[in-house]
Image (tube, rainbow, N blue to C red):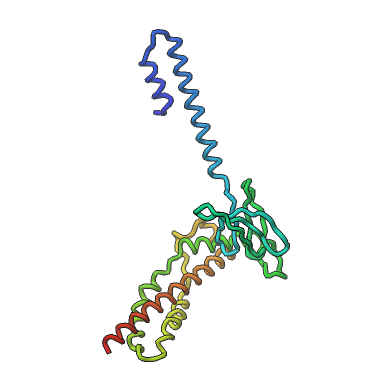
């Protein structure tokens, strides 16, 4: 049962001496509910309006208001959590598009093989979606589970050898060899799986995340192994 019908039944039961006055109250209440409904819809549309931001080629989104442009840079104001506004700039080549204060997105990227921009605008946008999905959903936690104990064991064995410094980098190389799997939960749109540009962007970011995690795991594991080796030998 809707809110309007429930309220209407309540007002029918709550009879005033003047029937016309009672009907007027019901109509007024319905008008008020209608007004509140349309106000909520309008507020929702305003909230969904894009705020000033800059979409980078790497898929990163920067909250900032573009203030000016020249042949080399895009200048923008970045507001910190404290409320302090810091003027900054970006190279044109690093930006795909930006959204102004009116919520209008302006494209910056252009296909130009002379600059190394081999993708079309649509392909580049798909590439960026791949980067964003991989950044948000690709984990590669197995590099931590395997990297710490393996590097730890090698660090323990080589704790007195200079070769111990090679351990983290060696594990990073080994970890980069397995194929990069696109986990279903990390893909925002299944149709993108047919887009080579999307796949390329996904794999690039997934590779970066895996290499960083494997190197960090190798360093931590080797450090633990060396510490134990020095204490026990």
Residue displayed at 47% across by 80% down: 173
Check the image and report above or below for 179 versus 57: below
User: Residue at 35% across / 88% down in the picture?
Assistant: 159
Q: Quarter of the image containing the N terminus?
A: top left
Task: Tell me where residue 221 sits by quadrant.
Answer: bottom left
In the rendered image, the residue lying farthest to the top is: 17
Q: Residue at x 57, y 64 (%)?
A: 58
Q: Position of residue 6 (x, y in %)?
A: 39, 24
Q: Residue furthest left?
A: 232
Q: Position of residue 178 (x, y in %)?
A: 45, 75
Q: Position of residue 146 (x, y in %)?
A: 36, 76
In screen coordinates, is 78 left or right of 69?
Answer: left
Q: Is residue 142 visible?
A: yes
Instruction: Determine the image quadrant of residue 115.
Output: bottom right
Closest to the observer, 88 or 119: 88
Q: Is residue 210 above or below residue 1?
A: below
| Residue at 67 percent of width and 67 percent of height | 117
Q: How many marks?
A: 0
Residue 212 against residue 191 in the figure, above or below: below
Residue 123 visible, this orientation: no
Judging depth in this view, the residue of 182 and 47 nearest the camera is 47
Rendered-image quadrant of the C terminus: bottom left
In-image side of 5 versus 59 (left or right):
left
């Amino acid at each position: 049962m809707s809110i309007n019908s429930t309220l209407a039944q309540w007002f029918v039961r709550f009879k005033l001496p003047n029937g016309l006055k009672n009907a007027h109250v019901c109509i007024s209440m319905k008008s008020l509910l209608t007004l509140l409904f349309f106000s909520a819809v309008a507020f929702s549309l305003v909230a969904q309006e894009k705020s000033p931001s800059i979409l980078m080629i790497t898929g990163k989104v920067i909250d900032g208001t573009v203030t000016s442009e020249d042949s080399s840079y895009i200048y923008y104001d970045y507001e910190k959590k404290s409320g302090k506004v810091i003027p900054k700039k970006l190279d044109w080549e690093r930006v795909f598009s930006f959204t102004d204060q009116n919520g209008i997105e302006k494209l910056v990227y252009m296909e130009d093989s002379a600059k190394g921009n081999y993708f079309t605008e649509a392909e580049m946008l798909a590439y960026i979606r791949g980067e964003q999905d991989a950044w948000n959903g690709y984990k590669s936690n197995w590099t931590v589970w395997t990297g710490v104990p393996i590097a730890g064991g090698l660090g323990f064995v080589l704790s007195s050898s200079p070769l111990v410094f090679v351990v983290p980098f060696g594990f990073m190389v080994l970890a980069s060899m397995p194929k990069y799997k696109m986990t279903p939960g990390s893909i925002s749109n299944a149709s993108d799986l047919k887009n080579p540009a999307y796949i390329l962007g996904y794999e690039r970011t997934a590779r970066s995340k895996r290499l960083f995690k494997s190197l960090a795991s190798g360093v931590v594991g080797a450090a633990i192994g060396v510490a134990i080796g020095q204490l026990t030998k």
